[in-house]
Amino acid sequence: MHVYENLGSDVRHPPVPAPVSASVHAPSRRSLRGLDGFNFFIANIQTGFGPFIAVYLTAQAWTQVDIGFVLTLSGIVALAAQVPAGILVDTAKHKRTLAAISAAAIALSALMLAAWPILPFVLGAEILHGLASCLMGPAIAAISLGLVASHEIGERLGRNARYASAGNGIAAILMGACGRLFSNRAVFVLTALLAIPALIALFRIRSQEIDPVRARGGQPGGSERHSPLHGIADNRPLLVFGAGLILFSLANTPMLPLVGGIMTMRSSHWATVLIAACIVVPQIFVAILSPWVGRRSETWGRRPLLILGFAVLPIRGVLFALFASPYLLVVVQILDGISAAVLGVMLPLVVADVTRGTGRYNAALGTVGTAAAVGASVSTTLAGYVNDRLGSTVAFLSLAGVALLGVGLLLLFMPETRPAER
């Protein structure tokens, strides 16, 4: 493990060797399989809170502006909670307990959506889901970082992304079938039930195998007397990465909900099935590509892969604007699989690179999560407004333009973050 003495400097400066952690034993097969299963089932649960909400609320006669308003308000709450959630994960001793609480809260929010699809309960459910999700991400990352050695984290994160994408794909098929055979409401009942196997998988991870020092990106024997956010505000690569995530989320978040609304209006009878296909298709590519991305990040570096993941988003926006057929829109979703595979691995990996040895890994992860939430919380309302006033073509082209700005930002300002020595 290496420590960067000055987080504000270019991360290509020669690293300083850190003492080896006393806890270097390889994790058991049971714990690794438990983490695989937890990633799989948590992705199952989160699938219900994607574009299925747009289909569900559109069928309840909600307008795109109303849907965007609810998603924006819940996003603002999640935005405010990102950094505190990261700090909490850094300081908490029991990472599994935090993950379990988050899973239970997400299940409860799904039941609220199913039972009462009216504004106060939908808003409350979305806020609860946002709070739980911004705690879940750092908790999974911390467990992963604490289980494996630093030189294995890229491959581990790729494995996490593979199981999460498989969970997303299978859950989308199940939820699409539920929506088709029963009702859109049944999708959220199924979402809540999937919390049970997620918790079973979580508690197969042995807590004593999670190294508390590695889990927070700390330096064994190092002093952590500074504030929880020390070394983050002056970390130039982290700030550039966060700015790029704002633009990426601003362009990416509204795309599939807008597609969901279009499919509902053009083919209401098959909308749920088509949305399920829009989720399944990219997840197949994520499952295939994620381990490859993790391995290539150790040989190619992080920057080329990041640029690739960002660059396919403006292309996707233009294609959504050009194609009217709901079935062709499903094909375009293949590009989402490339972006998701890259960002799913690179986001926690780049943060681990630039915070190694500081003990502030999850706080920094919360910081970039906040950046992504800034874009996501604003984008749904703005895109919904443009869609309602100027049409879907203009909305998608506008989102493509924002995505192109994100690509330019990385090209001009984002340095390589892979450590010079391993």
Image: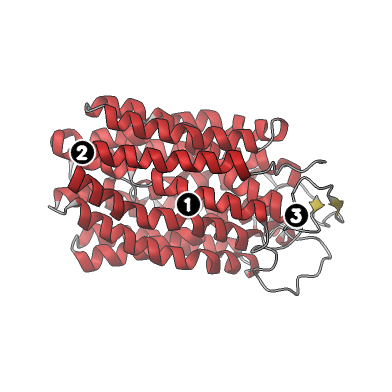
Q: Which mark is residue 246?
A: 1
Is residue 203 in view? no
Q: CA distance from mark 3 to mark 1?
A: 22 Å
- Mark 2 crowd level (few <14, some 14–19, many ≥20, 10 Å Cα): some
Q: Which label sits in the foreground, 1 or 2? A: 1
Q: Name the kind of residue labelled 1 in the image.
A: Ile
Give the amino acid at mark 3: Ser
Picture coordinates of residue 203, whole percent (x, y): 55, 56
Judged by depth in the image, the label closer to the viewer, 3 or 2, is 3
Q: Which mark is residue 367?
A: none
Mark 2 lies on a secondary structure that is helix
The residue positioned 62% from the left and 33% from the top of the image is 304
Q: Residue at x 25, y 33 (%)?
A: 274
In the drawing, does residue 314 fall left or right of residue 222? left
Q: Closer to the camera, 201 or 116?
A: 116
Q: Earlier in the sequence, mark 3 or mark 1?
A: 3
Kindly identify the amino acid type of the residue bearing the numbered disc 2.
Ile
> Contact, CB < 8 Å: mark 3 with mark 2?
no
In-front residue for pair 61/89: 61
What is the quadrant of residue 212 in the picture?
bottom right
Circle 3 packing at 10 Å, graded few (<14), some (14-19), many (20+), is: some
Label at residue 262: 2
Instruction: For mark 3, give the secondary structure.
Output: loop
| Residue 232 seen by the camera | yes
Q: In front here: 417 or 61?
A: 417
Identify the residue at image location x=75%, y=42%: 151
Q: Position of residue 374 (x, y in %)?
A: 44, 58
Residue at position x 38%, y 36% from top? 170
SS state under label 1: helix
| Residue at mark 3 | 9
Pinpoint residue 185: horizontal percent, then vertical percent.
21, 51
